[in-house]
Amino acid sequence: MTDVSAQQHDDTAESPTYMRRIRSFVLREGRLTKGQQHALDNYWTDYGVDYQPKLLDLPQLFGRDKPRVLEIGFGMGKSLVQMAKAAPEQDFIGIEVHRPGVGACLSEAVAQQVNNLKVFEHDAVEVLEHMIGDNSLDTVQLFFPDPWHKKRHHKRRIVQPEFVQLLRRKLKPGGVFHMATDWENYAEHMLEVMRASEGFSNLSADNSYVERPEHRPLTKFEQRGQRLGHGVWDLMFKKES
């Protein structure tokens, strides 16, 4: 996966309007392959949603009103497309700031003939704040965000109380915020923030972590980590109110 919307523009490059908010990701603009550029040129009109600061009509966007899953920071998009293909009864929204990943996701969606997926190339917080209606999402996924492992950078981690309450507004009652990380310190941070967050309950029986659910694909990134003996922690919290 990628450093989610957990990678953002350098603060100094932002306009004054956005400098008040600490950015949770650094934009690393990799080189586009020919295939990724082709996908962006030819498939964006089918899958892409341009950012604009006004609410989306999600049933109109998908042509139906089905359960909705939103993933923040889908990386190259392979597992997101895999999930969308495996659950045609749901609609999926992916948000990613890295253009090569967006292109790769579009290419994979076409190759897999997935039609229940829409994609943003923008900052996830701004999309959530301005384009996603309250009580409109069934699931929010945040898989392997940038851990910002240095202590002085922990404030840049996307899972913070203010962000969690933004997600609470966007989730339907009973909706789930699902996180996964391979950094134990970040898992502990997520757990601490979520336990203290009003309006959420832990789906873990012992109020800690859950087993990876079958619907979350095991990525190459995760498989490589497992071979190296790295742990992975999943957290799932339900919106109570």
Image: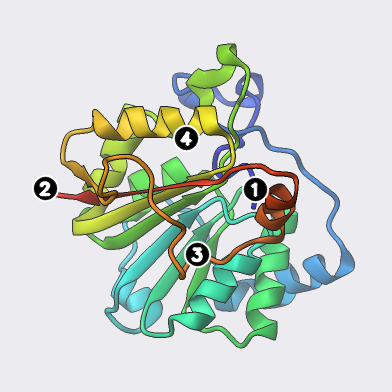
Please count the marks in the image. 4
Residue that numbered label 3 is attached to: 216
Eye-nearest disc, 1 or 4? 4
| SS of the residue under disc 1 | loop
Q: Residue at x 74, y 51 (%)?
A: 227
Query: Residue flagged by tag 3: what amino acid is it?
Result: Arg
Most extreme residue toward the top is 152
Residue that numbered label 4 is attached to: 187
In three-dimensional space, the C-alpha distance between marks 3 and 2, rounded to whole angstroms, equals 25 Å
Please report whichever mark, 2 or 4, sits nearer to the chain's N-terminal start: 4
Residue that numbered label 1 is attached to: 2
In three-dimensional space, the C-alpha distance between marks 4 and 3, rounded to whole angstroms, equals 17 Å
Query: Residue flagged by tag 2: what amino acid is it?
Result: Ser
Residue 236 screen position, x and y as percent? 34, 50
In three-dimensional space, the C-alpha distance between marks 1 and 3, rounded to whole angstroms, equals 15 Å
Residue 25 visible in rendering:
yes
Classed neighbour count for the residue bearing mark 1: other residues with Cα under 10 Å, few (<14), some (14–19), many (≥20): many
Q: Nearer the viewer, residue 169 or 61?
A: 169
Please report whichever mark, 1 or 4, sits nearer to the chain's N-terminal start: 1
In three-dimensional space, the C-alpha distance between marks 2 and 4, rounded to whole angstroms, equals 24 Å
Against 212, residue 146 (above or below) is: above
Classed neighbour count for the residue bearing mark 2: other residues with Cα under 10 Å, few (<14), some (14–19), many (≥20): some
Q: Nearer the viewer, residue 72 or 189?
A: 189
Give the image quarter of residue 199.
Answer: top left
In three-dimensional space, the C-alpha distance between marks 1 and 4, rounded to whole angstroms, equals 16 Å
In three-dimensional space, the C-alpha distance between marks 1 and 2, rounded to whole angstroms, equals 30 Å
| SS of the residue under disc 4 | helix
| SS of the residue under disc 2 | loop
Residue 194 screen position, x and y as percent? 30, 35
Classed neighbour count for the residue bearing mark 3: other residues with Cα under 10 Å, few (<14), some (14–19), many (≥20): some
Q: Is residue 34 left or right of residue 202?
A: right
Give the image quarter of residue 126.
Answer: top left
